[in-house]
Amino acid sequence: MTDTRQPTATVAGHPLHILLVPIPIGCFVATLVTDIIYALTANMLWETMSVWLLTAGLIFAGLAVVAGLIDFVFSRRIRALKPAWPHLVGNAIAVVLSLVNAFVHSRDGYTSVVPTGLTLSAIVVLILAFTGWMGWKMVHRDGVGAAA
């Protein structure tokens, strides 16, 4: 266990978690957009796009989770930061809800998105807005992952 606020999971000195998180965030936000378009048009293209976005988002979220947990577990000072726990718990909830959403989207017909899938997508985006803010605080206010 280290006493530093520097991430343990790095590639060429760059924090891996910070490098990975934009991908699932972008995928989950885009899922909400494609769900809204599908709800308005009932064009199956948009439902299919949502499924692909959820799948890619979950794959990269899994990678980001591993990197984030390595940093969290191996740095007592990161764990001690106030935003760290809400960031961790909120992101865990967002990933679980996105997994449930992938199963909801796997159903046939209009109900594969409306209303449950659309609602789950919106909830995930709201959670990510909060956890992103917590992550931003750790990076910009507390210096996690900043160059020494």
Image: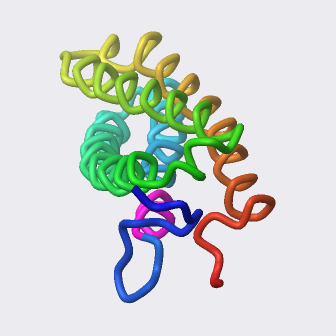
Quadrant position of the C terminus in the picture: bottom right
The colour style of the image is: rainbow
Q: Nearer the viewer, residue 66 or 78?
A: 78
Quadrant position of the N terminus in the picture: bottom left
The image position of residue 33, as x and y in percent, is 54, 41
Q: Judge whether 97 appears above or below 7 on screen.
A: above
Residue 25 as seen in the image, left or right of residue 129:
left
Looking at this rendering, what residue extends furthest in the bottom direction? 12
Looking at this rendering, what residue extends furthest in the right direction? 141
Residue depicted at 57% across the width and 26% down the height: 122
Q: Judge whether 4 appears above or below 65 on screen.
A: below
Residue 55 as seen in the image, left or right of residue 135:
left
**In magenta stretch: residue 146:** no
The image position of residue 133, as x and y in percent, is 72, 46
By secondary structure, the bulk of the magenta-drawn segment is best described as helix
Residue depicted at 29% across the width and 43% down the height: 58
Residue interval drawn in magenta: 16-22
Q: Nearer the viewer, residue 27 or 22?
A: 22
The image position of residue 118, as x and y in percent, is 48, 22
Q: Judge whether 139 appears above or below 103 on screen.
A: below
